[in-house]
Image (tube, rainbow, N blue to C red):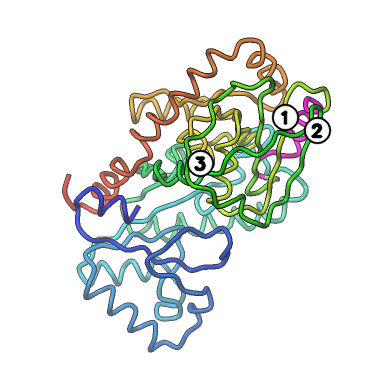
Amino acid sequence: WAQAWVDAGRGGAANWMFAANGRFAYAADYAEPISVNSAPGRFQAEQFGRVRDHCQAVVIEAGRPLFGRLFGYAAAREALALETAGLAVAALWHGSDIRLPSHHIARHPLSPYALPELRARAGELESNARRNRRAMGALGLAQLVSTPDLLDQVEGAIWCPVVVAQALIQAGAGAPPAAPPAPGAGVDVALAAPLGDAAAAPPAPVLAGPRPRVVHVPSNPLLKGSDLVDPILQRLAGEGRIDYIRAEGLTSAEVCRLYGEADIVADQFRMGIYGVAAVEAMALGRLVISDVDTSVQEAVLDQTGLALPIAKAGAAGLAAELDRIIADPDPYRRLAAQGPPFVAAVHSGARSAAALAQALGLGN
């Protein structure tokens, strides 16, 4: 988003990240360990002073405080202090920071928040989301959301689409395709090493081989619905109808490279949304299959004038959808081909920079 702001010619920008997961982390202009939150107050005061004196606006993500103990670990108090100092401030939400699990359970029969394994965590997320709504909502800040499903969760919110640099993604898919699994093999890969350092090359043509290569890379298997689709995809692989690769523990660059070797990316089957993973796969011209809510599809069309180029299938209908793809791949090739132009129009950064400018009142 910061780079999108710069690329759009709107001025300078920098992003500041608390780094908790070094392996999957993206690049940042400033990265601090999470322990900086408990640094002495003098350090936090100096940080606040730098922002106050050198920035025109601040976007606070996920209701997380930037200045530790200086304002009592309270993002809302920080926002008020920044506004008092003359800066424009907006809040930006990503998902579980503002989404109410109780609402999701009511609308989604397969909601992961209803799983016994997540019941306690869902209660924590519910409390945190309600706390964020009260604290940040009371300030009257402009509010941004990173995915269109959250437009229903945050009244008056502005969609700030996730940004994916297509050229970088395509470069990340540069390794030559690995040899496909033996017919009937369902491959479960937990990769902890890079997938290769070969020079960048265009992704392989989609649905051109004797069997579709299906890839599933869950960042969180419970949220993605891996338990629902793994048995189906393993069975189809065992019958020799598809080649199946499931991978975990990859960096973002490794995920993109694996997507570039896929025909089909099976994304998520419990949340009803689409996010960075689906955008990366679309940018590479892969066919994405996912259980995306009709309301999300309608929101994308309403906001952009473009249809979301994802093949919609729930877990119960996944095998039938794959049968249709195998029997008649041409319509699905055309759908996959819509991915790169969609990403260029919606997720390349220009639309996001405009959303940030609108929220912060910094030009058109």
Q: Position of residue 163 (x, y in %)?
A: 39, 45
Q: Residue at x 34, y 79 (%)?
A: 47
Q: Looking at the rendering, which quadrant does residue 42 occupy?
A: bottom left
Give the residue number, with chain letter if any, for mark 2. Answer: 185
User: Label 1: which residue?
Assistant: 243
Query: Could you tell me the amino acid type at mark 2?
Result: Ala
Q: Nearer the viewer, residue 290 or 81?
A: 290
Which is closer to the viewer, label 3 or label 2? Answer: 2
- Residue at the top extreme? 328
- Tally of numbered discs: 3
Label 1, label 3: how far apart the Cα atoms are:
24 Å
> Looking at the figure, which quarter contains the C terminus?
top left
Q: Residue 214: where, in percent of width, then height? A: 66, 31
- Helix, strand or loop at label 2? It is loop
Amino acid carrying label 3: it is Gly
Image x and y of residue 48, in percent:
32, 77
Question: Horizontally, is 74 left or right of 1 in the view?
Answer: right
The span picked out in magenta is 223-237
Q: CA distance from mark 2 to mark 1?
A: 7 Å
Q: Residues within 10 Å of mark 3 (few under 14, many from 20)?
A: some
Q: Earlier in the sequence, mark 1 or mark 3?
A: 1
Q: Nearer the viewer, residue 107 or 246?
A: 246
Quadrant for residue 52, please give it: bottom left
Main SS category, magenta section = helix
Please name the residue that numbered disc 3 is placed on.
Answer: 275
Task: Please report whichever mark, 3 or 2, sits nearer to the chain's N-terminal start.
Answer: 2
Q: Is residue 166 magenta?
A: no
In the structure shown, which secondary structural element does the residue marked by tag 3 occupy? loop
Residue 227: percent from left, percent from top: 76, 39
- Residue, x 35% and y 52% (percent of image)? 1
Quick one: 123 or 118, which is closer to the camera?
118
